[in-house]
Each structure stands twice: as C-alpha cells, then as structure tokens.
Amino acid sequence: MFDWVLQVPILSIICYLPLAGAVIIVVFMRGTSTLAIQRFATLVAAVDFVVSVPLWFTFERQGELFQFRESANWIEAIGARYEFGIDGIALLLVLLTTFLGVAAFLSSWSAIQVREKEYYIFMLLLQTGMLGVFMAMDFFLFYVFWEVMLVPMYFLIGIWGGPRRLYAAIKFFLYTLVGSVLMLLGILALYFYNSTGLLGWGGLGNPRSFFIPQFHEISSQIPPDLQFWIFLVFFVGFAIKVPMFPFHTWLPDAHVEAPTAGSVILAGVLLKMGTYGFVRLSLPILPDATLKLLPWMAGLSIVGILYGALVAMAQKDMKKLVAYSSVSHLGFVMLGVFALNTAGLNGAVLQMINHGLSTGALFLLVGVIYERRHTRMIADYGGISSEMPLFATIFMVITLSSIGLPTLNGFIGEFTILVGAFNRTWWWALLAVIGIVLGAAYMLWMYQRVFFGPLKNPENKGLEDLNGRELAYLIPIVAMCFWIGLYPKPFFDIMEKPVDYIVQKVDPEYAAAVADSIEPAAGADLLAEIED
Amino acid sequence: MQALWLIPLLPFLGAFLNGVVLKGRASKRLITGVAVGSVGLATVLALFYVVPSYLRSAEYAAGHGFEQVLWVWLPAGFLKLTSGVFAELTIDFAFLLDPLSAVMLFVVTFVGFWIHVYSIGYMGHEDGYQRYFTYLNLFMGAMLLLVLGNNFLVMFIGWEGVGLCSYLLIGYYYRQEFPPYAGRKAFIVNRIGDAGFLMALFALASTFGSLRYTEIFSRAAEDPSLLESPFVMGLTLASFVALFLFVGATGKSAQIPLYVWLPDAMAGPTPVSALIHAATMVTAGVYMVARANIVYQLAPGVSGVVAVVGCLTAIFAATIALAQTDIKRVLAYSTVSQLGYMFLAAGVGAYSVAVFHLMTHAFFKGLLFLGSGSVIHAVGGEQDMRRMGGLRKRLPVTYWTFVTGTLAIAGVPLLAGFFSKDQILAAAFEGHKILWGVGLITAGLTAFYMFRLLYMTFHGEFRGTQEEWEHVHESPPVMTLPLIVLAVGAVISGWVGLPRLGDWDWNWFGHFLEPVVHGVGGHGEAHHASLGLELLLMALSVAVAGTGIFLAWRTYGGSQELAGGAWWADRFPGLHRLLLNKYYVDELYDRTVVRGTWSTARNLFRFDAGFIDGFLVNGSRHVTVAAAYLSGFFDKYVVDGLVNLTGWLLQFGSRVFRRLQTGVVSQYAMVIAVGMFVLVFFYVVVALQS
C-alpha cells in the first residue's frame, strides 16, 4: 500500500512541501482573501502529515539504521553533501513535527487576526526548517536548517507576539544564535580533525566530509582532550535549546509572548532539537567526554527537574507555568539520555514525543481560553468547569498526561527514564522522583484554581465550550496520549535499533555484553551499514 | 477462568459509556443500568464463574496462581542487574489470580457492587449523577487492576488510578472551596507515597530485571542472598525495597506520617467514603505488603518498623476519634486506626491475618459508612453528631444494621471483627508484648468511640429543630438493602477464619492464603500459642472491649447532657482540645512542609527572575550595550578624533600657508628682500664668528 514511498525522494518531499506551499502563497496568492490563505496553508500542513505517515509503515524496524536515504553532491570544494536519511528516533520526531504542525495551523485560524499572509508563510518555512534538521545527515546541511528555522520563529514571536514581543524575540534569537555559533565551532573542529588537522591535534587525513556517520565512525580516534572541548561547545549549543538550567530563561519569555501556535511548535518541536543534538551528536561522537562529564550532566538535569518544577509552582500566568514545567520535563529527558543505558535512552526519546504532545496540547488549551477571555492569569479564572465541561475534561486528561499518570503517555516515559537512571546511579532517581510529586502539585493546583470552586468572576459566565475545530485538533492528541500510555510497544520497537546503537557507542560495558551475547555481530553490522 | 480479563474491563466499559458515549444524553435509568449493571456483571462473573473455576483448576491444586498475559506493555530496555549481567526489562499487561487476589477480588466486587446499589438512592437527587457513576466505575476498574495485576507495574496503574478516582470523587462537589482542596491534598500526599513505591520498583527491576510477582518471589525464595546482599545506605536490598514499598503503603493506606489526607477526604459523597476510603482503596497498602511478604520476611528490621508504625497509627488515630463530633470524621479516624491494626499484623509476620482483618473491616466499616450516609441523608446533610440523637426511632433499619457494625468493630464475640482483631492481638503478643499492649488499649478505645458515636447519634433525644425532626425518614430500600447485606457480612465474614484453639484448626482462611504467604525459612505464619494462653488473650480483649462499651454507656448513654462534650472533656480541657484539633499535625505540616515548599518556590522564582535572568542574562545584555557605547565613544572621540585631528591639522596648516601665496608682486618682492637680508645677515654673523 505504501510501496510508492520507496520510489520517491520521500524525505525531500516532506521537508520541502511546506516551503513549496509558502512559495505558492507568495507568488500565486497575491490578491487572495486571508481565509483562502489560511485554509490553503493548513491544507499544506495536513497533506504534509498525510505524506509523512507512510514512513511509519514502511520503515523497517530491523533494517538499516538510516533509511529513506537521499544523497547528492552539493558543495564539493568543502566536502559538504546533500544527505538525507532518518533512523527510528528521527522518524518519530518527523512525525511529531508534521502531526503537531496541523494542530498549530488549525489553532491559528482564530488566534491570528493581523497580517495573516506573512504569518502562514513563516509558519510553513518553520516546518521546513525543523523537518530538515531531523532529516539531515550532513553536518553542514544540518547547520543550515538549524539556522533557517531560527528566522521564522523570530518573526512569529516578534510580529504576532504579546506586549513584550520584541524583547522576547530578540532574546530568543540572540540566545540561540550564541548556541549555534558555538555548535558551528564544534562542527568545524570535528571537520578539520577528521581531515587536515586542527591546531595541535593533527588530523586523521580522511577526505573532507561533513557526513555525520563519518564522525560516529571516528569517535574512538578523537583524543579525550579534544572530545572534552567539542563536547563543551556542543553542550552550550544544545543546552540552550533544550533548555537546561541555567540556560533556560529565554524560554518563559518566548513562550509567554509567542502566539499560541508559536508556543506549540516551540515546546513541541524546537526544544527537541537540543535533546536530539545530544542523542545524535554528543553521545555517539564524543563517548569519552560523555562518560567523563556524566555527573555534571546528570546533576544539571536533576537541578532542572526540581528547579523547573518549583519555579512553575510560583507562577501566576498559565503559559509561564507551562513553560517552566517544560524545563522540568526536559530535565527528565536529559536525565534519561545521561543514564546511558537503553532503558534511560528509550524513555528519553519517548518522553520527547510525550512532552511534545502533552505540552503542545497544554499550550493549545491555554490558547483556547485566552482567545475567549484575553487573559492568562490564573487568578482571573475559577470554577469554569461548570461553564466549559468539555474543555475541563480534556484539560484534565492532558494534565494527567503531563504529571505522568499510568495509562497515559507521560508515565511510560518517566518510568522508563527513572528505571534507567536508578540503574546507573540510584540516588539520581531518588532526587528525580521528587519532581514527580512537585509536578502533581503545581499542575493540580493550577487546575483547581482555574476550574474548581465557585464561579467568582462574572466575566467567566457563559464562556463558550470547545467548538468543532478545537476538538478536531485536541482529540487526536488525546488519542495519541492514550495510545502511548496503553500500548507503547510500537514506539519502543521503532527506536530499539538506534538506541541500542548509541548506547553501544557510548557504554563500552554494554557494547562488550552485546558482543558476548547471542548476536556477536550486532554492533559490527550497524557500523558497517553506516559505512556503506 | 479465561474470562479474568473481562472483570476489570467491564467497569471501565461502564465508565467509558457514561463518561464519553452517553455523556449528557442518557436518562437516569440508563445511566444507572450501565453503571450498576457493569459492576454487577463483573461481580457475578468474578464470584460465580472465574473464582470457582480457578478453585477447581489444576493450578490451584498445585498451589499456583493463574496468569493471563494480555499484551506486552512496556519493553523498557536493557538494565545492568546487580549481578552484573545485562537483562531486558519487559513488563506485560497481565493478570494473576491466586488465593490472595481472589480474596481481594471478592471484597472489591462484592462490597463495591452493593455500594453502587446504595449510591442509586443516595446520589439520586444530585446533579452530576452521571459524572458520579463514571468516576465510581472508573474506580472499580482501577481497583481491580490493582488487585489483579501479575506484576508491580500493573499494580501501580491501579494504585495511581484509584488515587485519581479518589481525587475526582473527593472533589465531587467542585463548586465549593473545600472539596477540591481536599481532593488535591489527597492526591499529592498519595503521590509522596507513590514516589517511594516507584523507588522500590526501580530497585526490584535493577535486581531481577523483572517486576513479575511470581518471578521475583520464586527467585527470592530460592536464593535469599540475592535480596540480603547489602545495597545502599547500609540497607540490604530487601530492606531498601521493603522500606520504600512501605512508604507507598503509608500514603495509600493512611499511616503515620502520611495519614493526614484521609480525614479531609470525607468531603466526598458518603458512599465514596465507604467504598474508597474504608473498604477498598485504603487497604491497598495492606494488600501490597501481603503480596510482597517474602521481601518483608527477608527484611526483619523494616518489618519491625511496619509493626511499630501500624501500632502507633492505631492508637494515635483512635485517640483522635474520641473527641471528633463529625460522624464521618470519627469513622475516618477509625479507619486509619483499623488500618494500623492491619499493618501491625503484617509487621509481625501474620500476613494472612492482616488480609483477614482487611476483609472483615471492609464489611463492617463499609456498613458503618453507609449507615452514617443513611443518617446524613435522613437529617438533611447534617454531619455533626451534636445535632443528632434519638434517630433510632425513625431509622430502625439503619439503627439495627449500625448496631451490628458497631458490635463487630468493637470486637464483640462471634462477630467478624472479634475474630480478626483477636488474631492480630495474638500475633502481636507473639511479636512483642508492648505492641500487644498498645493494640489492646486501642481495642478499648475503639469500643468507646464507636459506642459514643452510636449513643450520640441514635439514642437520647433529637437535638436538632422540630422542623428537622419532621423530615427525618428512613432511607429507601435501595439504600437499606445494601445495609442489610453488609450487616450479614459483618456478622458471618469472621467465621471463615476461626482462631486455632489447640487441635481445633478451623482457620480455613489462613490455609487458603498459605500458598501466597508461605514463609522463607524461620518466620512462621501461624502462631502457636497454647490453648490456655489463647483463651486468656481472647478473654482479655473481650474484657477490654466491654470496659470501653461500659464507659461509653456511662458517659453518653441515655442521659441528656450529650450535646457537646462529656465529663472527661470538662475535666481535661487541654487534652480534649488537643484531640479535637488532631494533635495539630495538619498545622505542623502546613507550617513546615507546605509553606516550606511554597516559599522555596517563590524564592527560586525570585532568584530566576532576579539573578539568572535579571543579573546574568539581562546583565550580559547591559554589559554588551555598555561595551557598545564605550566602543562608540572610543570610535567617535579616539579613532575618529585622530582622523579629524589629521584633517584639522591639515586645514590649519593650509590656512597658515595659504597666506604666503597672495599673488601680490610687491609682497613677493618684499619677502625676497627680507629673505635676502636675513640670509646675508646670517652668513655675515656666522663668518665673523668663525
């Protein structure tokens, strides 16, 4: 049924479809009504999602590590190539991006009332940028997409944001720019070390290349001190994106000021760039430095979990609360990554998806009520569940998903992460579970103040409950939350191979155990595949 | 037996129908049919088909449980076990039916079903009838998952699931301020326990690479050294697991120090208190300890902690119950106290006795709560016993069933509570005499506060207004029938576990549970007191209970001065106030933990906004801006200044030298002349000097 997918450059299609949509809007839709533009842009996002779904069905779980490969020459002088391909982890993130994209576009219909045309153009460009990051297998290409996606987000916040939008936009831009410039330094260091040599470190004399698997390949040959420095610059770049404590303060501002769809994309997808960077680049390329800096990384993750949760508790603005809860949740993801076992990493990858779904949904829900009342202050609400029972129900389900209630997605991720973390160092888990208690405290407290109690504020009387369009983008997310909560096996299956590969790269003990076990060639196979 | 999976599914289905499919568009009759029907079906299926077929099966005969794997739920990944090998942790969504879960299945479905029936009457006039039954069905499903799971993680689904339903049902009257608060308090206090529970699961997973009961327990029994090896903090692995599991139990089963949520949980509708906060959910911790009994047997130190905490909780809560005037609060503290008894039993190794008391307690405490609901229903929502009295005349069925329950909990011979409590005390006597002594005093206190409640509510004269008295009426049959059924249970449910008297061993219940709670080595389950000692202990507890009843009768029985306190309240006002205010523990927690967390949160936010964002981030911005201005200044005045200086100098110079070139011939001639003159003069002077 989906065989055609293998016949076409499917990844490029998925990646550039939004770009094509944007071009069409610019070129052919000059005099068209905003309504048509918004419908058209949403249609493009929906088609993009539909086109990306076959990836899930055609991806071979036990096949090659990277699939749907596309390869072409690009800038031969420096060895940069056009290399697309996804492994199970990237596939999940691609699907998350296209899936949340549809919800974000749908939510914009009512939220955006000025300069709609530019808005939808930027949103489409943003989709292309994000998808490219997850698909690129060439460092140069990766960096280009990484920078490309910065620009539309800057404008989305800066033009359609709240009162302090300019401050937030510039802060966001500068912050992430600092990170990406540092990352570029790391990329260049790897690039030169691989080929001609770098400062005092000599080179490996390989042909010039930005091919990411090539760097995986040479990971064991990179001297520890060089690994340390590259890890450090990568760390700053990714930690800003995640964001990890103490690089997180751009996030609350960006979230509060961004329009709803911006927040959804920001929390749902953009933050995953950082964690994805750690998983795809830092760990497998710099295993030695990873092991050496492990306590620091885990420490910062745990601080992030507890700090984010406590600060979230003190918030009066719903969006800001959700923003700080993201700091806490991403702390869990990072803890899972640095548990450096397959359980922890499985959980971390799944939690990236979970966070995208539940936090994305939370921002959508806050957006729903903001459009009706034009306030995000918790104190302005109270008792509205009698006015909006459907809204209250869905908000409750998402809240429960966010605090990790079993049978919903958050629990699967958190449990897997924590069991992995405990397995690495038991008291990491002991500190992190406090975050679970705090998570319940701040989320349920917000819920109580917004939905329960007497309806004190007369302005909240007769608030309109969810309409069909809102249900259309919320129900699928709720369904996904239940799916992952009840039957997450397909998700674990699809990430099994890449996760195993990364852990083997970074944990020599595990690699040795795998080598000793029944499939002695498992690790070698994977490496051979990448060479091809 | 193969239909086991249907038992939890049916209530979930009911909840789904009422909560989603039929939401807002079903008649009351349909709502009731779906909700009560689904639970009724599950009950019939469980008690008349699944359990009997299990009891006839080969598995049961061989002392095994019946396991049913539904699907692979959580293939978490590889862990490095404490033994050094890597193993894959894969958790199934699977059920286990063995004697222990069969007992729990019986209690949950049977009591649960009758409380559903009762709710039809009690909640009949409430709006949100459908919401109520959705949550109640959801609760049944979660509770059944809890007791039927074949591994700790499925238990944990149920564990958190019942916590959620408890939260939703406590906060059922969400338009008021207090119930949602009480619900949230319950959830968060429970979450503290759940975090401990999770820690225990991580440790088990890291040791066994599995969370399945049969695998963990059979391997632990085969090779106790696996669990007895030192782990962390000077604890053995068994102690670590046992301790953290017990932290979970203190949350869910309301033991010191996490019991504070249960009394506030009474803000929910009364049938909810009966079902969740007396008969089923709060006993989950006892079930869990009994389930993990092998771990506790390998952790004698932690078992001691369990016994002591249980014993302290029992007497502590019982003393608070002495002074409460809210009928439901008395019962709530009574529940906390009785749960303490169960942990006392489990702590001294009498696991089947703990489960036995769990079962009898489910009957008589469920009955008492439903009875109190019938009273509250009759007096128009009033819960203060000082405004009741004399109700037995108008509420005969409620009265007599309530008397049955009171006699059962007070430990009057031949009723359920007598047998189970007696066995707990006998086991405690074997364990440590002090534990037994405290347990015995608690039994006296229990008899006292229960008869105080009985007298204040049903005896004497009505203390409300005449108008209220006019409205007092017996509840409809749909409510009294469950009372009668549970009253019968409160009488006869103890008969299945008669104490062993010498050679007379009629403890069917204990033997039934033996395959699950058989010991590893020395720690025997059955106590072997001599016949004489056994009878003496029994007589003593009857005497103590009798004393309690007598004192209650002397203080509250018959006389008219019941309205408020009693002689002892006047004589010891300080003590009375202390008990009335529940030892100020809530206040203590509020001042320390709650406000501590809250002020930490606020201060961290200040730190975040002030230091990290304000000082570091915006500070770096200001530094950058300042540097920009500085370099602008430098650029303008130094770099550009030099440029301008050059230009100015040139300009100045040209202005000066411009004067030389005027084009006036006479001036040139003059300059030439002067120059000539100077040169000549110079040469002459120089020549002359040399």
Image (cartoon, grey):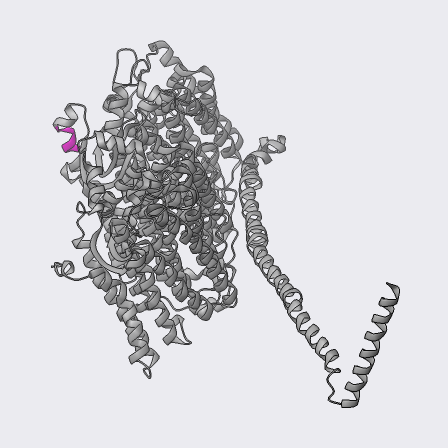
Say which of B333 and B105 sits in front: B105
Magenta-drawn stretch contains B52 = yes
Asked where in the image residue B262 lies, by quadrant, the reply is top left
Give the percent coordinates (x, y) of residue B638: 66, 64
Give the percent coordinates (x, y) of residue B243: 40, 27
Q: Is residue B363 visible?
A: yes
Asked where in the image residue A77 lies, by quadrant, the reply is bottom left
Say which of B461 and A511 sits in front: A511
Q: State the residue at coordinates (21%, 55%).
A: A69
Judge whether A519 appears above or below A396 on screen: above
Say which of B208 and B588 sits in front: B208
Magenta-drawn stretch contains B613 = no
Give the percent coordinates (x, y) of residue B351: 33, 24
Position of residue B93 in the picture relative to residue B59 (left or right): right
Q: State the residue at coordinates (29%, 18%).
A: B519
Q: Which residues are magenta?
A: B51-57
Q: Is residue B165 visible?
A: no
Give the percent coordinates (x, y) of residue B390: 46, 41
Magenta segment's dominant SS is helix
How many callouts does the rendering have?
0
Quarter of the image where the N terminus of chain A is located: bottom left
Asked where in the image residue B371 lies, by quadrant, the reply is top left
Position of residue A311 in the picture relative to residue A15 (left or right): right
